[in-house]
């Protein structure tokens, strides 16, 4: 087999491995490689091959005949310097694709199947379309709860697993969908001030206007290397870090890169995604927040109960102490939507300011109380009172300041976006509903979470009386184009329903 | 919105539209574009935008800040010269994706849904993973026959449609899966010699060792431009061309580019793919060959009947006169597998040579006879005799030679691959079965269809007595690596079953 000379090509193809061959390359012509052929790349004196998809090049300055160009992803994975002699051969389709076809045909898969699938995905043997086939197959046929358990185990085993060396490692998670729902930044300092271990890793926003990592980043650094994170947790009993630096259930991240553009979020994959991250992060006790409401991810009480049972079943079989709280998901929590505005709400609650949003405070206390009751020394029913004492006494604020300083305080937190537009009530009456999806959409169009100051600031919540012309919320943006898109979106639907005195 | 300067980047990304932005480009940074963002590209003074996926570049020689690089696909579609000022904006997800999600949820889609999906696919609004979601969704939920009809209509309407200006345009098609089954190259000259119009367009092999276009190409040119093809059909009443040059049901080609790497071939998509191409090609009368056998695509008589009914239903509703023939799919047809070897078989039959494979001759006469009976002047039951007279008299051979000359005769047809290896019978007895999939796999590994001379030459067929050590077939290859892979595959399974005298 003729060799090719390795070349690095400075193109970022995100999570898809792409390699480049010149159209006149003898290897390309004689061996029948073509655009989109999947190949294995081998170095001469062996080692682990990498898999990539071929793109054909007609420009010698990008990749010349006799060279094999590697995109940044493949170059990083292969770990071999430019100029190395390599060979390529046709990659056989991953053997586990047969299991995917069985799933598409409606069969139930077992642990060995999921293990083979996650291993092949972790080894970059799946193309994006093969991953899409797996995800759609699971979404459409549905996953039995045993299958979800198998998938969680398989995902955990393909990555690293943290061990905190303590019998009780607390965690919380919300399935998402409610703008402004930034309880984690209150729960963590309260629980840590009680002395429990809560090393919290969070994601950045995927489809929402702000994730906990985006919001915490307004106040402090969140991209901590594993050593630094361990150090902070040892001293503070807590951290509020971005989870992307550790290699925890990496298959989940790869699958999300396909789920996101497809806007797919099937229950089976959602449960597997959440629980695999928690188990890999070393959590032993988890409170799960499932908001229920007409514009939330879970819309009915019966759907919520079904989801709760599945979470409990899988948690029990993984040795994870898991409790589900079904919460009010009928409207956004707090006032701000977007990183800067949500960080402001959090700090108002921690500072016990009179203007602090009561619903955010109340929900955080409920969640923190339930976690504190995981402590074997706390009597059942006492958690809430303990949490409230910690918050009211300022001990939660002190803990938060200590965490911020430990992670690296942002000396110059950005203000809310300088472009402002107020949306006013079209009629007098009472606010009867606020649409979570519409408010999240407006905040995202305004630029959140990439522009930290962008978003929506709510002045009214459900149940508040309003006069016609009174402001309902303010849109904040940094860039004119975003600002105008967000305002345009409110032309179609302001996201608020105002009922008349007749109880409409 | 700031403008970017268009640059052509000589990278062939096959059917996926990719555009390149430098990481330090102000537009990239301020507008929140990221790797895999889908964008609309607009020229300044309007016109139709094109859609592409962003790859991020760190090398100014590929794409500099302020430039927008277009891969060959996008550059060709956009049709605007380098240096043009363009703007980009985030592409909204195609509206028809909602219908895809409804299909995944198990709903039935209507004509408007399929029309919207095919229009968005034709406009390059679907990424590969979105197409995979559509295909898997259809495969898993299944398609009602009304849905298949809707999809066929929608696929035909997104492309060109040929009109031959005659009331009877004959066609034949085989659903595939049987190696060596090269009846088309016999049926077309027989039917045309009878005077009927049969302008045949065929595909190249996708997953098989040879398509009709690959095999005909051994003898003559097959990539004819539409004008040339019309000219040949006018004079010869027939052609044997590759169908890839006309824009017939282009959505089918785009979907196949995703189905192929997924090895997906669901009945609904198969029927839609076949019938959309036939209707777009202007065919009015179609014979469909469905081989049935344990290693064929259709394995049982009841599956075959179900498929036949669906084909008939959809054909009737499209105004296509369609007849299905269920044929013997228990073993390969003829002796050769691979373009050169199959072309040899065809020419032996046309020349009425004593060594010509009888099964290939017989099947071609059956099919040609059925097509000839579409002629209103032919009495029912007389088609076979007419076809046989045309073949035996040499008129079919004359017609074939005329077609070859009209398309452009290959002056120097390649010989069978020079590397040869014989597989012999492990025991004495009678050949009881030949595995279609295994024989196709061996021929493909040997290099077919890319190496025209590569493939398998069968010396024995089912029912033939053999002595231990007698040759069953010969593998032909051009390249040593392929040759060895093909031989390795026979180590696992030679693809033949030999039964003892005891009737095993």
Image: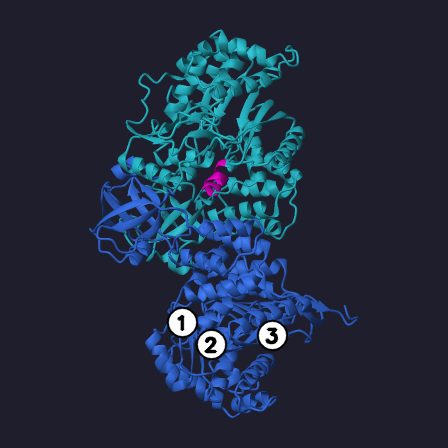
Chain colours: A cyan, B blue
- Give the CA separation, mark 1 to mark 2: 10 Å
Quadrant of residue A352 within the rendered picture = top left
Q: Chain of mark 3?
A: B
Q: Earlier in the sequence, mark 2 or mark 3?
A: 2
Where is A141 relative to A398, above or below?
below
B330 with respect to B174 (left or right): right
* Local SS, label 2: loop
Image spot of residue B431 (x, y percent):
69, 71
* Residue nearest the observer in this picture, A124 or B78: B78
Chain ID for label 1?
B
Residue for badge 3: B459
As for residue A259 lying within the magenta part, the answer is: yes
Q: Are marks 2 and 3 in contact (CB under 8 Å)?
A: no
Q: Would you name the residue on which mark 1 appears?
A: B161
Q: Residue at x 70, y 68 (%)?
A: B498
Residue with the mark numbered 2: B283
Asked whether the viewer can see residue B25, the reply is: no
Work out whether mark 1 precedes mark 2 in sequence or the reverse, and give the earlier one: 1
Is residue A95 found left or right of A309 in the rendered image?
A: left
Name the secondary structure under disc 3: loop
Check chain identity for marks 3 and 1: say if they share one: yes
- Which mark is in front, 2 or 3? 2
Q: Earlier in the sequence, mark 3 or mark 1?
A: 1
Residue at image location 42% in from the left, 39% down from the top: A78
In the current view of this chain or complex, which residue is farthest to the front? A502
> Which residues lie in the magenta part?
A253-260
Separation (CA) of disc 3 from disc 1: 44 Å
Closest to the observer: A241 or B423? A241
Indicate the secondary structure of the residue bearing disc 1: loop
Q: How far from the left and from the top, in percent, is residue A52?
A: 43, 47
């Amino acid at each position: 087999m003729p060799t090719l000379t390795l070349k690095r090509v400075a193109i970022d193809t995100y999570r898809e491995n792409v390699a480049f061959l010149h159209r006149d390359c003898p290897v390309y012509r004689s061996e029948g490689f073509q655009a989109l052929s999947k190949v294995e790349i081998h170095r001469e004196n062996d080692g682990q091959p990498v898999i990539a998809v071929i793109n054909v090049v007609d420009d010698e300055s990008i990749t010349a005949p006799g060279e094999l160009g590697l995109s940044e992803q493949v170059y990083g994975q292969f770990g071999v310097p430019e100029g190395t002699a390599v060979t390529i051969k046709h990659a056989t389709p991953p053997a586990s694709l047969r299991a995917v076809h069985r799933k598409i045909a409606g069969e139930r898969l077992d642990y060995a199947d999921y293990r083979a699938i996650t291993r092949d995905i972790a080894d970059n043997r799946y193309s994006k379309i093969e991953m899409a086939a797996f995800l759609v197959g699971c979404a459409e046929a549905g996953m039995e709860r045993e299958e979800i358990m198998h998938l969680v185990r398989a995902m955990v085993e393909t990555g690293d697993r943290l061990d905190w060396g303590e019998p009780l490692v607390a965690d919380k998670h919300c399935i998402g969908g409610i703008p402004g729902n930034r309880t984690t930044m209150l729960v963590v300092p309260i629980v840590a001030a009680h002395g429990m271990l809560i090393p919290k890793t969070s994601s950045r926003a995927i489809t929402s206007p702000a994730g906990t990592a985006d919001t915490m980043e307004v106040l402090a650094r969140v991209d901590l290397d594993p050593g630094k994170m361990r150090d902070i947790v040892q001293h503070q009993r807590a951290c509020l870090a971005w989870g992307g630096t550790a290699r925890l259930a990496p298959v989940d991240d790869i699958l999300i890169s396909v789920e996101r553009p497809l806007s797919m979020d099937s229950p089976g994959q959602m449960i597997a995604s959440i629980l695999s991250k928690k188990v890999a992060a070393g959590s032993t006790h988890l409170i799960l927040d499932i908001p229920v409401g007409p514009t939330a991810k879970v819309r009915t009480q019966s759907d919520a109960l079904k989801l709760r049972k599945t979470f409990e079943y899988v948690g029990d079989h993984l040795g994870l102490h898991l409790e589900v709280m079904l919460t009010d998901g009928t409207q956004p929590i707090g006032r701000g939507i977007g990183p800067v505005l949500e960080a402001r709400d959090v700090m108002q609650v921690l500072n016990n300011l009179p203007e602090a949003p009561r619903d955010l405070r109340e929900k955080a206390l409920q969640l923190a109380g339930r976690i504190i009751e995981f402590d074997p020394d706390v009597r059942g029913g006492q958690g809430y009172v303990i949490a409230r004492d910690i918050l009211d006494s300022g001990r939660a604020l002190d803990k938060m300041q200590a965490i911020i300083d430990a992670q690296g305080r942002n000396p110059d937190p950005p203000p809310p976006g300088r472009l402002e537009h107020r949306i006013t009530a079209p009629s007098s009456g009472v606010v009867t509903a606020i649409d979570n999806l519409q408010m999240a959409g407006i905040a995202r169009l305004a630029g959140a979470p990439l522009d930290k100051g962008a978003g929506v600031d709510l002045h009214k919540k459900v149940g508040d009386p309003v006069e016609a012309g009174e402001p309902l919320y303010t849109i904040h943006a940094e860039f004119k184009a975003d600002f105008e898109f967000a305002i345009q979106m409110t032309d179609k639907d302001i996201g608020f329903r105002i009922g008349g005195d007749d109880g409409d």
